[in-house]
């Protein structure tokens, strides 16, 4: 497995770095590709013994000054023998330019490359029209890295496969352990300790703690300015209901759907959902939930942490960066609040399996490619260990290095590498491609652990431990979780319209019920009737049929 703990450090790099462009292949190591160009055997570098030029339209990362002179570009050409002539698409209007090229089917490059150059829907649409080449045969015949990646992650292959059975694009897969359980609340430990309280384990205990935060002046300024529980409308997992609903009903705060024995359930139509609304409404009426929580944005929420006086007792946020500019200082008061148990004993946090982190559409080959097999081999190598590290960070020994024996990552297992020059996640100027290339990595886990609060990786140890000890034990079983779905093109527009309308309606009604503008008793039936009018049954039918087609 790429970036596996079991791989000896540098072993893949040594295996793959077998030569430079212009080398002569050993007997039996070459073969003629479909276009007639002579290539090395799969997994052997360079890919070609005579330089092949690819025309690539790319969306570069903001840190890349010049793709032509970029260190990673030059290094990749030395490794593969593939030269690139770039059509750099300015980020501000890249999507517009790509859409124009695709709809007119003119001025197509050999390859589109970059973060989100095409959507899964575009890959299917234009792949079906022949503008993009299916990659299935290339994977079978020429791949080492993508093939290994798919063999070890079969669900990812499904996620990346269009409804017609073809794979038209390659994507990005950054394994993020703390993202698997990302609906978090952070409680103010300083306040809790000052008041002599224990970490709440049930909804009743949480209610009591929030009441104490409101009434006992834990910030010590003599004013009743404490906000017991807050959230925001923007930011990663900052919605109030993402945590507070789960002691009553499963709520992933996204589509709010789950599986029960293979049947799709809309959580927002159940009795448990109604119970959760009742509880949140009670807390809102008693001033335990921030009145601004349904209207303020992420930056407004930060003011309650960054000011002279800390105002918040508990904050809904996937990561501390969502509520603080300075993760090292301003968040020192806040610790993870594990899920609390509801009245029925339900204690659960949503689980987002690794497949949810796969981002497709980073690399496609168009029908204009003269040597498509070379283009594929070029991209396939980007998934290799040394290539991934170099393309993302820059020069080995300067921007990153392999870890020394005894160095560990956030999981206390042997680390693979150490980043040397990035500052707050930004690579050295013109040293790397950063997020542009397809890859498979797990930066936060296998990076040598840092003790520098200014380092972007510093927070990862805290997130890892919080997730491992406080959330994973209560994670929803994977059989409850809907995998990523790829609705057929014929139903795509209807599905997207229903999904958007229903999610907006549900989100608006959560706020209305919690703030008392609607009554969970008297207005519940009207709420369900409106969902019927919008088309909830048809929406669930589309979700169910897509799930059954791909996963049952």
Image: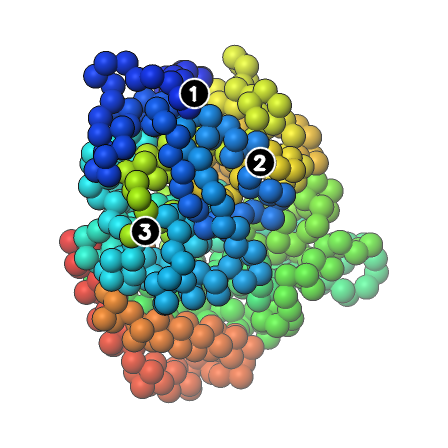
* Figure colour scheme: rainbow
* Residue 276 on image: x %, y %: 44, 68
* Marked residue nearer the N-terminal end (2 or 1): 1
Q: Is residue 1 above or below residue 534?
A: above
Residues 329 and 376: in front is 376
Q: Residue at x 42, y 23 (%)?
A: 21
Classify 480 as above or below 271: above
Residue drawn at x 72%, y 54% is 305
Residue 20 got which mark? Answer: 1
305 and 189: which is toward the camera: 305
User: How far is mark 2 from mark 3, CA to CA?
Assistant: 26 Å
* Location of mark 3 (residue): 368
Please state the horizontal and vertical placement of residue 489, each as a whole percent of the image. 25, 67
For the residues labelled 1 and 3, say whether their Cβ atoms are less than 8 Å apart.
no
Camera-nearest residue between 502 and 28: 28
Residue 545 image-quadrant placement: bottom left
Q: Secondary structure at mark 1?
A: loop
The earlier-in-sequence mark between 1 and 3 is 1
Could you tell me how far apart the alpha carbons at marks 2 and 1 are, in whole angstroms?
Answer: 18 Å
Crowding at mark 3 (Cα within 10 Å: few <14, some 14-19, many 20+):
some
**535 relative to 337, above or below:** below
Label 2 or label 3, whichever comes before in sequence order: 2
| Position in image of residue 37 (x %, y %) | 27, 32
The image shows residue 271 at horizontal and vertical percentages of 34, 71
The residue that label 2 is drawn on is 70
């Amino acid at each position: 497995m790429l970036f596996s703990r079991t791989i000896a450090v540098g072993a893949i790099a040594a295996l793959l770095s077998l030569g430079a462009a212009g080398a002569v292949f050993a007997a039996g190591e070459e073969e003629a590709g479909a276009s007639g160009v002579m290539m090395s055997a799969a997994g052997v570098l360079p890919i070609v013994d005579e330089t092949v030029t690819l025309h690539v339209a790319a969306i570069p990362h903001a840190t890349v000054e010049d793709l032509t002179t970029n260190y990673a570009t030059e290094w990749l050409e030395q490794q593969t023998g593939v030269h690139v002539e770039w059509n750099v698409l300015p980020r501000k209007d890249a999507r517009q330019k790509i859409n124009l090229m695709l709809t007119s089917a003119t001025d197509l490059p050999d390859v589109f490359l970059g973060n989100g150059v095409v959507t899964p829907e575009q890959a299917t649409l234009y792949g079906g029209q022949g503008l993009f080449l299916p990659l299935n045969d290339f994977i079978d015949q020429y791949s080492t890295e993508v093939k290994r990646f798919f063999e070890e992650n079969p669900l990812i292959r499904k996620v990346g496969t269009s409804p017609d059975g073809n794979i038209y694009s390659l994507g990005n897969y950054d394994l993020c352990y703390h993202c698997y359980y990302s609906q978090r609340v952070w409680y103010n430990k300083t306040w809790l300790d000052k008041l002599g309280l224990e970490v709440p384990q049930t909804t009743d205990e949480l209610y009591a703690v929030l009441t104490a935060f409101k009434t006992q002046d834990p910030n010590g300024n003599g004013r009743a300015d404490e906000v017991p529980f807050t959230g925001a409308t923007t930011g990663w997992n900052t919605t109030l209901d993402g945590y507070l609903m789960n002691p009553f009903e499963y709520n992933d705060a996204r589509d709010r759907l789950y599986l029960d024995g293979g049947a799709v359930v809309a959580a927002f139509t159940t009795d448990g959902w109604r119970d959760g609304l009742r509880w949140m409404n009670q807390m809102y009426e008693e001033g335990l939930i921030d009145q601004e929580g349904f209207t303020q944005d992420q930056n407004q929420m930060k003011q309650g942490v960054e000011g002279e006086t800390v105002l918040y007792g508990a904050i809904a946020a996937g990561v501390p960066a969502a509520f603080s500019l300075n993760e090292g200082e301003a968040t020192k008061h806040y610790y993870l609040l594990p899920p609390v148990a509801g009245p029925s004993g339900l204690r659960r946090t949503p689980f987002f399996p690794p497949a949810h982190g796969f981002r497709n559409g980073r690399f496609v080959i168009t029908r204009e490619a003269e040597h498509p097999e070379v283009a594929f081999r070029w991209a396939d190598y980007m998934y290799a260990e040394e290539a991934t590290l170099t393309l993302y960070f820059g020069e080995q020994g300067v921007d990153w290095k392999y870890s020394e024996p005894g160095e560990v990552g956030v999981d206390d297992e042997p680390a693979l590498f150490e980043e040397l020059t990035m500052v707050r996640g930004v690579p050295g100027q013109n040293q790397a491609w950063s997020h542009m290339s397809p890859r498979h990595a797990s930066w936060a886990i296998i990076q040598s652990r840092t003790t520098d609060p200014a380092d972007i990786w510093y927070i990862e140890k805290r997130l890892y431990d919080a997730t491992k000890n406080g959330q994973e034990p209560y994670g929803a079983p994977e059989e409850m979780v809907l995998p990523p779905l790829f609705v057929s093109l014929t139903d795509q527009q209807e599905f997207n319209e229903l999904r958007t309308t229903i999610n907006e309606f549900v989100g608006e009604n959560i706020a209305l019920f919690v703030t008392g503008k609607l009554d969970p008793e008297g207005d519940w039936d009207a709420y369900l009737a409106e969902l019927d009018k919008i088309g909830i049954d048809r929406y669930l039918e589309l979700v169910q049929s897509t799930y059954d087609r791909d996963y049952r």
